[in-house]
């Protein structure tokens, strides 16, 4: 019941996500449609979705426009380009009576879908550039705020964290991971998760370029699989300056003089780069009073937290709610597109690399994309715009892969036929496309089923999801 209640309460964001995914697919197919019409090809059907028609209408141009029951894709039925009757339905056109299609036409029509996705992403990127993308200060940094001494692996074994073993320290700024520059914490997480490096002894490894005290140095860390998703992790969290959002007047912090909008700088001389640093400081200095340096109205002030000889104070016992600063970035449109393409290829390279820990379960199908949209919508429409850029770029890149039944497969077949000077055997093309169509449908079913399982799992209330006073509000 809790899961059902959670899903129903998010119905609006789910519908928004479904609309955004369908619109991106519509834009992709619109590219194919307009290019095909421009080049004089026979267009039999324009469908958003697969399967039986939910709604359809035959236009004056002779094209059947359709909304289908399964909103997991779409297609433009072009019998002159490819026979995909398994998924698009059989064509009623007499192919032998249609004029042959030139190589340039096949190329333009095949590329047009991806080009329209990139065009849409570029328009949305201009919105981000003008309006700006708000990010919490910890998400906008690559500076390490805390290094875990130990981490729990996916098999529940607790070991020394790779970051601690490699000598990473709070305050280090990560510049590159395995040769890939990182600009924010999302880049750090993705570059680490998609890493494929291995040492000579077979252990996982990643090479980090960090900046420490204005000096650049190289460190090698050995990530381990942690968390239920079994991703490569090393045991670090981002840096941020804790800001007091609210203080209870009769609390420990209130009696010590802490006020709203105070910024925590140091505790007992140790820089506070993360609330976990504060937690550790309270624990280690439990038997004596501790000096707390804060910035208030542009000036530094030293307060004193009382000793707690019985047992260490916890952040939750201070009587304080914390928050973090928000940074508004205005990345250039072209840079956003290039970054999206880079992320797509980074994920693809990791998926194909046998030394990677990324698998098919980590891909996002239509269900996964709707889930991501629904989560983004809860934070604000600007995050929906930002996610749409990434998804449209990803759709463009994935559709241009040289795989039969995808746009890249049409390009591949057309190019081979052009080089050999004659068309490929019809039986070969039909058999190849039929085989890959079955594989593609199986892959879509697997990815979407896994996405649904993850969605339901995310809806289950867990202890980890319960907010604690130690977690800053963002």
Image (cartoon, rainbow, N blue to C red):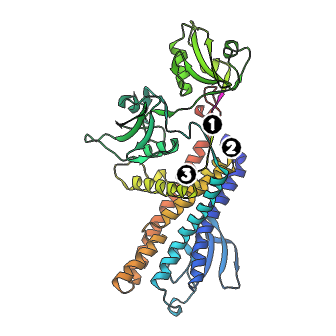
Q: Are marks 3 and 2 in contact (CB under 8 Å)?
A: no
Residue 279, percent from left and from top = 55, 21
Say which quarter of the image contains residue 287. Answer: top right
State how far apart marks 3 and 2 are (Cα): 17 Å
Location of mark 2 (residue)? 6
Location of mark 1 (residue)? 461
On-image quarter of the C terminus: top right
Residue at 68% of width from left, 45% of height from top?
A: 378
Q: Are marks 1 and 3 in contact (CB under 8 Å)?
A: no
The one nearer the camera, 129 or 351, is: 129
Residue 267, percent from left and from top = 55, 18
State how far apart marks 1 and 3 are (Cα): 18 Å
Is 468 rendered above or below residue 228? above
Can residue 441 be seen in the rendering of this structure? no
On-image quarter of the N terminus: top right
The one nearer the camera, 13 or 279, is: 279
Residue at 59% of width from left, 73% of height from top?
A: 31
Can residue 258 be seen in the rendering of this structure? yes
Q: Is residue 63 left or right of residue 340?
A: right
Residue at 69% of width from left, 26% of height from top?
A: 261
Q: Are marks 1 and 2 in contact (CB under 8 Å)?
A: yes
Q: Is residue 230 magenta?
A: no
Provide the secondary structure element on which disc 3 rests: helix
The numbered disc on residue 451 is 3
């Amino acid at each position: 019941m809790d899961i059902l209640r959670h899903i129903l309460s998010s119905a609006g964001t789910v519908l928004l996500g479904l609309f955004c995914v369908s619109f991106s697919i519509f834009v992709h197919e619109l590219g194919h449609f307009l290019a095909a019409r421009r080049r004089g090809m026979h267009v039999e059907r324009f469908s958003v979705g697969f399967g039986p028609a939910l709604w359809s209408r035959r236009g004056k141009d002779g094209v059947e426009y359709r909304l289908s029951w399964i909103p997991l894709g779409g297609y433009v039925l072009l019998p002159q380009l490819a026979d995909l009757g398994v998924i698009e339905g059989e064509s009623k056109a007499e192919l032998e009576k249609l004029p042959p299609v030139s190589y340039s036409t096949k190329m333009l029509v095949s590329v047009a879908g991806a080009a329209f996705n990139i065009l849409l992403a570029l328009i949305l990127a201009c919105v981000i550039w003008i309006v700006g993308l708000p990010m919490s200060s910890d998400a906008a940094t690559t500076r390490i705020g805390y290094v875990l001494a130990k981490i729990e692996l996916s098999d529940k074994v607790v070991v020394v964290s790779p970051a601690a073993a490699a000598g990473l320290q709070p305050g280090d700024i990560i510049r590159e991971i395995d040769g890939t520059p990182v600009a924010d914490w999302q880049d750090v997480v993705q570059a680490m998760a998609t890493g494929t490096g291995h040492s000579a002894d077979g252990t996982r490894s990643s090479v980090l370029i960090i900046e420490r005290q204005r000096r650049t140095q190289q460190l090698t860390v050995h990530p381990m699989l942690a968390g239920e998703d079994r991703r490569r992790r090393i045991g670090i969290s981002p840096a941020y300056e804790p800001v007091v959002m609210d203080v209870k007047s009769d609390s420990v912090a209130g009696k010590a003089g802490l006020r709203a909008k105070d910024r925590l700088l140091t505790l007992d001389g140790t820089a506070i780069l993360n609330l976990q640093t504060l937690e550790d400081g309270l624990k280690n200095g439990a038997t004596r009073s501790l000096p707390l340096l804060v910035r208030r109205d542009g000036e530094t002030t030293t307060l004193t937290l009382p000793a707690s000889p019985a047992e260490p104070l916890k952040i939750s016992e201070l009587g304080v709610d914390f928050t973090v600063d928000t940074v508004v970035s205005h990345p250039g449109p072209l840079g956003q597109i290039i970054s999206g393409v880079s992320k797509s290829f980074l994920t693809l390279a990791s998926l194909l690399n046998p030394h990677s820990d990324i698998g098919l379960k980590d891909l996002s199908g239509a269900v996964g994309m709707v889930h991501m949209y629904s989560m983004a919508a809860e934070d604000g429409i600007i995050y929906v715009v930002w996610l749409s850029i990434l998804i449209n770029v990803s759709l463009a890149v994935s559709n241009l892969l040289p795989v039969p039944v995808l746009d890249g497969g049409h390009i591949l077949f057309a190019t081979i036929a052009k080089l050999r000077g004659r068309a490929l055997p019809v039986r070969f093309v039909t058999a190849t496309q039929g085989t890959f169509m079955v594989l593609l449908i199986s892959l879509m079913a697997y990815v979407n089923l896994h996405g649904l399982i993850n969605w339901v799992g995310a809806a289950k209330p867990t202890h980890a999801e319960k907010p604690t006073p130690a977690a800053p509000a963002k």
